[in-house]
Image (cartoon, rainbow, N blue to C red):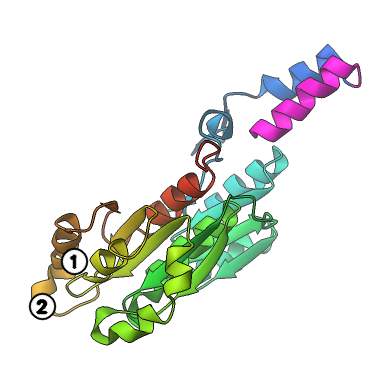
Amino acid sequence: MERKELRNLLERLSAGAADVDEVMTKLRGEPFRDLGFAKLDSHRALRQGIAEVIYGAGKRPEQIAEIAGAMLADGQKTVLITRMSAEAAAVVEKTVPLSYHEMGRVGIAGEMPRPDGRGKIVIATGGTSDMPVAEEAALTAEALGNEVTRLYDVGVAGLHRLLSHTDDVMTASAIVAIAGMEGALASVIGGMADCPVIAVPTSIGYGASFGGLSALLSMLNSCASGVSVVNIDNGFGAGFLASRINQMESVQ
């Protein structure tokens, strides 16, 4: 159950439009639902403001379908599924309304919410090869109710490409900077923007990049203030954090 749904239920009770038994029935299944192979955290949205997300890798397609179906049945409007294979999506969409995005390996069951953040999130990549991670970040942010602007292939090897989008960078509420190789993009954007910058190192690069470790270390040692770093290839984590920043009510 999400916060808006609970508030609406309590307001109906207060106004006499719902009775105590109805409210008790709605709350009785909390705080989790046991499916045997998974325990769905029904209180996640109440505690954190964002409902539980399904990590698709390592799960059988039938398990993903049952989990997503249970979440939708419990009233969750949007179910985000990350690291989902095309094969799994083909099975899940037979029983659950699903929109699958192959590049980002993201499935979205249910409906896509309207943007309700205070501004926009910019997702920028150093190169086209970083797009799978970027799409995971972008789709995560969109599924959580944010407006997203994509700036792809604007790396430091051709800095003029990024500078042509200066207005987008300077008007963002949060920016996700995604790059492999030496990972310099995060520092450059961090020196241009007045909002938090979330750096995502990717595993794109040649031998001495060590599967993204060189980009990770470069981003951790950024001389630009206001840059934070998530794990290698963790587009979901970056999109989630950017959403939190964009939807903070106390930030003007």
Residue pointed to by mark 1: 215
Give the answer, above or below, for where 100 lies relative to 11: below
Asked if the magenta segment contains residue 15, the reply would be yes
Q: Residue 112 appears in which quarter of the rendering?
A: bottom right
- In the picture, the disc for residue 207 is 2
Q: Could you say whether the residue bearing mark 1 is in a helix, strand or loop?
A: helix
Left or right: where 227 falls relative to 88: left
For the residues bearing labels 2 and 1, Cβ distance under 8 angstroms: no
* Total marks placed: 2
Q: Can I make out residue 229 in this image?
A: no
Q: Callout 1, which amino acid?
A: Ala
Determine the residue positioned at 21% across, 70% down. 184
Pinpoint residue 227: horizontal percent, then vertical percent: 28, 54
Left or right: where 96 falls relative to 249: right
Write down the region rendered in magenta. 1-17
Q: Residues within 10 Å of mark 1 (few under 14, many from 20)?
A: many
